[in-house]
Amino acid sequence: MAQTDNIDDIVAQSGLSKQQVRMLIGARTPYPAYRTSYERMRKQLIAAVGQARYRELVKAGELPAAGKVISSAS
């Protein structure tokens, strides 16, 4: 996976919905599914993008809207 992604790329690669990816990367508690499925979805995202990339995404705090790019370069 490239070191730059937009949310649509991560959705396509992981098989999760945009809402699920946003819940995993950004604020969790506004999402009702957080309490019941967070850990399962987190494992699915890690399997898709890798542990290192997952940490980069979480460190960034949130994903940009579709079409915008998130980069690990600081």
Image (cartoon, rainbow, N blue to C red):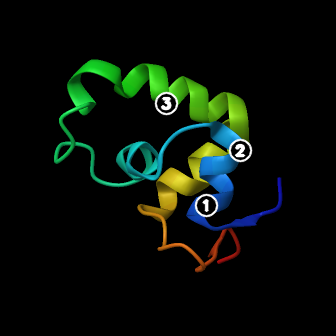
Whether residue 35 is situated above or below residue 15 in the rendered picture: above
Q: CA distance from mark 3 to mark 2?
A: 14 Å
Q: Amino acid at mark 2?
A: Gln
**Of labels 3 and 1, the one closer to you:** 1
For the point 42% across and 61% down, the residue is 61
Whether residue 40 is situated above or below residue 33 in the rendered picture: above
Q: Position of residue 5 (x, y in %)?
A: 68, 65
Q: CA distance from mark 3 to mark 1?
A: 17 Å
Side of 42 where 53 appears, left or right = right
**Which secondary structure lies at badge 3?**
helix
Whether residue 28 is situated above or below residue 45 in the rendered picture: below
The residue at which mark 2 appears reads as 13
Q: Residues within 10 Å of mark 1 (few under 14, many from 20)?
A: some
Q: Amino acid at mark 1?
A: Asp
The residue at which mark 3 appears reads as 42
Q: Residues within 10 Å of mark 2 (few under 14, many from 20)?
A: some
The residue at which mark 1 appears reads as 8
**Which secondary structure lies at badge 2?**
helix
For the point 83% across and 61% down, the residue is 2
